[in-house]
Amino acid sequence: MSEQAEAHKNGAKAHVESNRETKRRDSGNSENSENKKPKIGDTRPAPVAGQAGKNSPESEGKNTNRRRRKRRKSRTNADNNRSAAGAGKIELDEANLRKRRGQERKGKAVGRYTMAVHVEDGVTQIATLEGRSLLEFFVSQPADNVSEIHGNVYLGRVENVLPGMEAAFVDIGTPKNAVLYQSDLLSENESGKKGAPRIEEALKNKQVIICQVTKNPIAHKGARLTQEVSLAGRFVVLVPNSSTFGISKRLHEKERKRLRQILEKAKPSEHGVIVRTAAENITKQEIQIDVERLVAQWKEIESMASKASAPALLHREPEMPFRVMREEFNKQYRSVVVDDEGLYLEASKYLETVAPALADRIEFHDPAGEDLPLFEKLYVNEQLTKALDSKVWLPSGGSLIIEHTEALTVIDVNTGKNVGSSNLEETVYKNNLEAAKEVARQLRLRDIGGIIVIDFVDMEIQKNRDDVLRVFREALSRDKTRTQVLGISELGLVEMTRKRIGEGLLQSYEKAQN
């Protein structure tokens, strides 16, 4: 090991030790801290008073470090992506930093969300919470796992073109050939899908193409592909060889106008650019750096494609924790808590690069020094167990029954123990309002995709129906996954679709346990 590498390692260790010591001082030295009672969802008893230090820290630390080294070896993630994020790093003035930090109270960050990252036996689990309520759950396998290829760019070989299905099967090196539909072809005509060529005209057997995975392989289905490649950065998305020009609609109009002026100068003439929600209050220089980095990334992909033989991987997306931090982490998050030392150091470095104003919101949960595991402390395991059940209770006593079939997911809304206090219509109306919000949360948490049918309790008054549908759509608007909701039918059913990307909570949870 070189002197430079040794110095870096020692510095990282000192960083973690300093963090540990600070947390121990903040938690206090009172006897109460050694005598914490078990909480709801705990799977192991609280330590007995006076026996907190029974196990030898040295021996426990050695075993923990051995396991961590083993886990770190399995990480073959996109290191180049994370190192590239550091290129062109700039120092922000205090005014800009203040805008992006968000609210603080008594020196601590205030936010709606918390991200918890748990690492065990090479598997990384990510939980997003709003307050104490679990919103999303992800399981990240090693980056070279065939089920974790969403966003990857490949040099593929067309194996079979099916005009009758308007699709082609493409070999990208996975066990099952991926599928490319006609609507996802690269069209020189920017007028939309109507201008897309017929698939048998655009593709031939054995043809080599650059393509990107838009949906992971699920069960017996192969991955879904597109020729419209997009490269995501922290603030912008680059669409190579396109005239796309867009700004996130979640930003207010004044900010959109400011960003539009910046983008008109920063946008490369040969590529399209979409500004993300994370670009709020960022500077012209930051956008320019992000665009230049993505353009360089695309040039590297093209260079690799010209030299490689199909099938070949051209670009790998970062592992799930870094993708979530890149796309979701903002001032509304109070903290990111990680219980693996190696990942904590990587994530700290990553956040210092992509979000310096929020870099101090990452915390290390030391498994050896804490009374409870991270997911027990934040009630994640308890909520995961409930989310695997088909029945969900509503606060007022009503319930949801969620059933999955091969073709679609059915959600039945019941009043259950909710008997109301005035009349039947009012009771049903309030029950459906509760159900609308909870259904939206359950769709995100369980990662339910495809066709979804919701059977709300029948309402006689049209205004009540409209209100329930409005509340449901508002709750869904916070879901980053694309959804489409139809109106309430004459039978009282709401039909909707939610884009299917992953396998769903049940499969992810089983993966994490195996």
Image: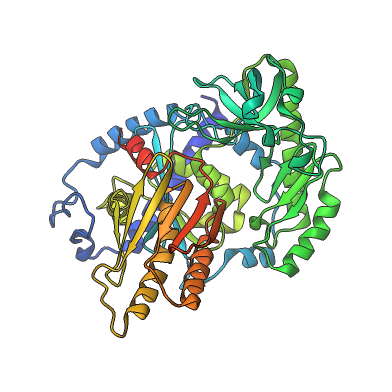
Does the rendering let one see residue 88?
no
Please name the residue shown 20% across and 61% down the image.
Answer: 36
x, y percent for residue 298: 73, 33
Quadrant location of the C terminus in the rendered image: top left
Q: Is residue 402 above or below residue 6?
A: below
Q: Would you identify the image quadrant in which residue 511 lies?
A: top left
Please name the residue shown 73% across and 42% down the image.
Answer: 238
User: Of all residues shown, which one is farthest toward the bottom?
Assistant: 422
Does the rendering let one see residue 452?
yes
Q: Report the number of discs.
A: 0
x, y percent for residue 501: 51, 41
User: Of all residues shown, which one is farthest toward the front?
Assistant: 490
Left or right of 414? Residue 224 is right
Please name the residue shown 62% across and 36% down the image.
Answer: 81
Query: Residue 121 or 72: which is nearer the viewer?
Result: 121
State the scheme by which the image is colored: rainbow
Q: Is residue 328 above or below residue 175?
A: below
Q: Is residue 514 above or below residue 357?
A: above
Q: Would you identify the image quadrant in which residue 188 lies?
A: top right
Query: Residue 241 or 354: which is nearer the viewer?
Result: 241
Query: Residue 410 or 274: which is nearer the viewer?
Result: 410
x, y percent for residue 248: 68, 57
Query: Residue 408 or 124: which is nearer the viewer?
Result: 408
x, y percent for residue 189: 82, 38
